[in-house]
């Protein structure tokens, strides 16, 4: 655990108390069983906003508390533990980061206070294929009068059904795969020509396919500079990835703790199965991996707070390491629980399904290992 | 806190001028580790530098001044290290006395023992070796059988120890001996044995990497004075466990010893950097062999994750939170990274990474082979990887022993 300030410790404790009492895994199960259309419980998200969690990285002048990314990571780690479904990551971290890093004063004024208050959900609309490839943008933005007309499709838009604002990548020049020619747009979800359909994934969280059919936007919808959106996009993505890493770390920790409890209580052959060395050493390996993953996640979040030049390297390290760890722990959770772990009545399946969706979001382990190597010149 | 009332700048200035006055420029950057385990160096400058550091107590900067240590605060010790690094100076005081035995004796020794031994370690006058493992007691260390019989005014020691590294050069041995055969862990005592005494015989062991500092040591009717017992009779196991913690944190790379960090990797250099010259890059600037590249990337990330964990642990140690990561976790993670690194470097070098001797091979190629082989020991000594996993399972995760077994 990183060395925390008093404020950070208080925030973490508050998050732990709330998630354990108000949003345990049973709340996620209830939400899933109810078929909640947004993939989360709006009433629970309102409570999170009331506690100020939607404003943690947002400057005070726009209604936030400006506590930084490590602080928000502490909250996300706790929500990850109980698989709390909410747009916190998409709106209060990803979309908020895009506005903070690339927004004009007018754009910030228009959107950030609403995000900080939890009145509006923002998200990133960046994916067009089955694999994370942020430079492979085909969605076209053509000049139209003083503004642009957007046509194309985005998929795997997290919280896409709930979003009121979509930070969308579009191509203003070049071809898919070029980093030059990508432009970020702030697209209100009620824009004419925009339609969306729920993308029902195994993890039961909110996602959507969003279709743009000649969506007309003014020039003031451009976030940052036209054609030169790549560097801003990378910065925004790295922040979103680091936040997701914190959530994934929390999920992995809880999956491990739940499994460890089972090893101490399940009796076979006249003794608890946790007394068997074959299982003990697998548990020790998971514990070791969790310790290493925590170091990477905290280093990435701290580097963002310090605006350090090694943010991209540390974020890819964290996403790959915590991805590998969550992958392992979620598989072992099912295996070590045996038959009960295969049943829908048990929570193990929730952790397994959420693990894979979180691994895929903003780039999986293979993507980030390759990126780490490219950053380091090999 | 030395004599500077906590004024770190004044300490820095004093350390700088003392180092400049005492460190022989001929030794600049020559690193001390090579002399510590080997035979006594003949070099006059090394002797002078060792003497100066020994008198000052700065070879063991944070040990208490009253026993010959430097008496520095951790902050001052860091400044000293920075100032030494600035001029290419290195710590000539080291070995098992400073890394393992000294800290343990400071904790468990009586006043006479501390007065007798700590200063000599600080001055690098007496070299120590470790008498723990036996041919029949490896991972199950507590089954050791080297016997120490109470003969009134002395103990009579008979038995043999193995992996007594540096035994052929050591003056003293800190040893686990059996003083009660009716109990396992509670029948072990911690005894200090003079390696020059009659009845002590040392034979070096040749390992897969060639010559090694490891020895087999035989004790035949060795008389050891009663005052050489550390801690209570039959209370040696507790002390041994504490000493092993010092050993593990040194092996894992998390120790406060001057060696630190890269030593655990056994071999120098980065596989990624070496692959550029030995394997080459493709048109996109990637290591040309894609399978090798994948494995190198995964390894480099593991190494970085381990390094960040060491940094996290040090930051936690400096805060009042205290470190949260156990030494067993660090030992396993660090040694795994070191062995993976050595394997990759040998693979990257191809046949050049398999040279045993001869002018066809560059010195770093030859040392990579020896480092790769020698490094296999890191997951065996200091408690094997499997023993560390047992410790993590039982002491940290709270998992129980299997029915009918007894270990600790």
Image (cartoon, coloured by chain):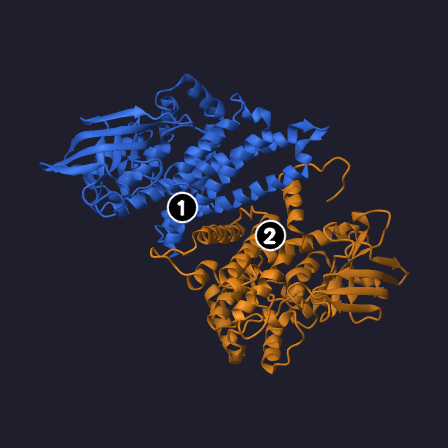
Dot 2 alpha-carbon crowd within 10 angstroms: few under 14, some 14 to 19, many 20 or more: many
- Residue B122 pos. (x, y %): 65, 69
Residue A14 visible:
no
Asked if labels 2 and 1 touch by Cβ distance under 8 angstroms, the answer is no
Q: Foreground: B205 or B198?
A: B205
Where A306 falls versus B73 (above or below)?
above
Total labels drawn: 2
Tell me: A151 left or right of B190: left
Q: Residue furthest top?
A: A34
- Residue B27 pos. (x, y %): 54, 77
Q: Which residue is at 18% across, 42% downward?
A: A172
Q: Spatial distance from mark 1 to mark 2, Cα to Cα?
A: 27 Å
Q: Residue furthest bottom?
A: B44
Quadrant of residue B253 in the image? bottom right
The chain letter for the residue carrying disc 1 is A
Q: Residue furthest right?
A: B152
Quadrant of residue B53 in the image? bottom right
Q: Foreground: B40 or A345?
A: A345
- Residue B106 pos. (x, y %): 68, 59
- Label 1 sits on a secondary structure element that is helix
Image mark for residue B331: 2
Where A246 falls versus B204 (above or below)?
above
Image mark for residue B132: none
Quadrant of residue A240 in the image? top left
Image mark for residue A368: 1
Where A174 falls versus A197 (above or below)?
below
Supply the letter of whichever chain is orange: B
Residue A334 visible:
yes
The colour one sees for chain A in the rendered image is: blue
Q: Which residue is at 37% across, 47% downward?
A: A304
């Amino acid at each position: 655990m990183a060395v925390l300030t008093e404020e950070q410790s208080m925030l973490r404790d508050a998050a732990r108390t709330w998630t354990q009492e108000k949003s345990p895994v049973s709340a996620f199960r209830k939400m899933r069983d109810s078929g909640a259309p947004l993939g989360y419980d709006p009433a629970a998200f309102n409570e999170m906003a009331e506690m100020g969690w939607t404003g943690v990285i947002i400057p005070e002048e726009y209604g936030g508390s400006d506590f930084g990314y490590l602080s928000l990571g502490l909250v996300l780690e706790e929500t990850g533990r109980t698989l709390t479904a909410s747009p916190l990551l998409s709106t209060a971290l990803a979309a908020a980061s895009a506005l903070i890093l690339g927004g004009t004063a007018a754009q910030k004024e228009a959107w950030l206070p609403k995000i900080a208050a939890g009145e509006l959900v923002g998200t990133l609309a960046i994916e067009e294929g089955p694999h994370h490839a942020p430079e492979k943008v085909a969605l076209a933005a053509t000049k139209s009068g003083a503004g642009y007309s957007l046509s194309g499709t985005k998929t795997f838009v997290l919280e896409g059904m709930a979003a009121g604002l979509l930070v969308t990548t579009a191509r203003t020049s070049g071809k898919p795969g070029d980093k030059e020619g990508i432009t970020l747009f702030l697209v209100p979800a009620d824009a004419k020509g925009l339609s969306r359909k729920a993308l029902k994934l195994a993890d039961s969280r909110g996602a959507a396919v969003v279709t743009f059919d000649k969506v007309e936007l003014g020039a003031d919808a451009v976030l940052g500079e036209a054609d030169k959106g790549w560097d801003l996009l990378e910065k925004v993505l790295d922040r979103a990835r680091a936040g997701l890493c914190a959530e994934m770390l929390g999920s992995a920790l809880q999956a491990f703790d739940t499994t460890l409890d089972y090893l101490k209580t399940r009796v076979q052959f006249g003794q608890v199965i946790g007394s068997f060395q074959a299982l003990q050493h697998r548990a020790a390996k998971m514990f070791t991996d969790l310790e290493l993953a925590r170091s990477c996640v905290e280093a990435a979040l701290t580097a963002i707070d310090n605006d350090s030049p090694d943010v991209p390297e540390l974020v890819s390290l964290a996403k790959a390491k915590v991805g590998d760890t969550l992958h392992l722990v979620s598989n072992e959770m099912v295996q070590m629980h045996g038959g009960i772990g295969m049943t829908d009545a048990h929570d193990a399946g929730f952790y397994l399904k959420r693990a894979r969706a979180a691994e895929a979001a903003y780039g999986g382990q293979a993507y980030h290992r390759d990126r780490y190597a490219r950053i380091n010149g090999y | 806190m030395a004599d500077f009332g906590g004024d770190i700048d004044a300490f820095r200035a004093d350390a700088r001028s003392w180092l400049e006055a005492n460190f022989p420029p001929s030794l600049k950057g020559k690193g001390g580790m090579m002399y510590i385990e080997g035979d006594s160096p003949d070099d006059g400058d090394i002797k002078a530098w060792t003497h100066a550091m020994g008198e000052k107590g700065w070879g063991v900067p944070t040990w208490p001044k009253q026993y010959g240590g430097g008496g520095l605060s951790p902050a001052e010790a860091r400044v000293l290290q920075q100032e030494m690094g600035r001029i290419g100076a290195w710590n000539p005081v080291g070995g098992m006395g400073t890394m393992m035995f000294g800290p343990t004796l400071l904790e468990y020794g009586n006043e006479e023992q501390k007065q007798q031994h700590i200063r000599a370690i600080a001055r690098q006058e007496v070299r120590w070796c470790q008498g723990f493992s036996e041919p029949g007691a490896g991972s199950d260390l507590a089954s050791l059988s080297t016997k120490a019989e109470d003969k009134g005014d002395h103990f009579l020691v008979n038995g043999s120890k193995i992996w007594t590294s540096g035994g052929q050069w050591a003056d003293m041995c800190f040893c686990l001996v059996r003083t009660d055969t009716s109990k396992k862990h509670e029948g072990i005592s911690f005894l200090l044995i003079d390696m020059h005494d009659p009845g002590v015989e040392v034979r070096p062991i040749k390992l897969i990497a060639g010559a090694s500092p490891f020895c087999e040591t035989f004790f035949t009717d060795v008389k050891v004075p009663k005052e050489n017992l550390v801690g209570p009779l039959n209370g040696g196991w507790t002390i041994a466990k504490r000493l092993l913690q010092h050993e593990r944190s040194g092996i894992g790379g998390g120790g406060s010893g001057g060696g630190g960090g890269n030593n655990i990797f056994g071999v120098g250099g980065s596989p990624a950097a070496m692959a550029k010259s030995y394997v080459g890059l493709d048109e996109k600037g990637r290591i040309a062999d894609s399978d090798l590249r994948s494995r190198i990337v995964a390894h480099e990330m593991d190494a970085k994750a381990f390094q960040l964990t060491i940094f996290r642990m040090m930051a936690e140690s400096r805060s009042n939170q205290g470190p949260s990561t156990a030494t067993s976790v660090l030992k396993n993670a660090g040694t795994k990274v070191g062995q993976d690194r050595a394997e990759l470097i040998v693979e990257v070098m191809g046949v050049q990474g398999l040279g045993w001797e001869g002018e066809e091979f560059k010195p770093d190629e030859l040392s990579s082979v020896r480092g790769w082989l020698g490094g296999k020991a890191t997951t065996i000594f200091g408690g094997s990887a499997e023993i560390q996993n047992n410790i993590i399972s039982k002491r940290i995760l709270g998992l129980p022993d299997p029915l009918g077994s007894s270990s600790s």
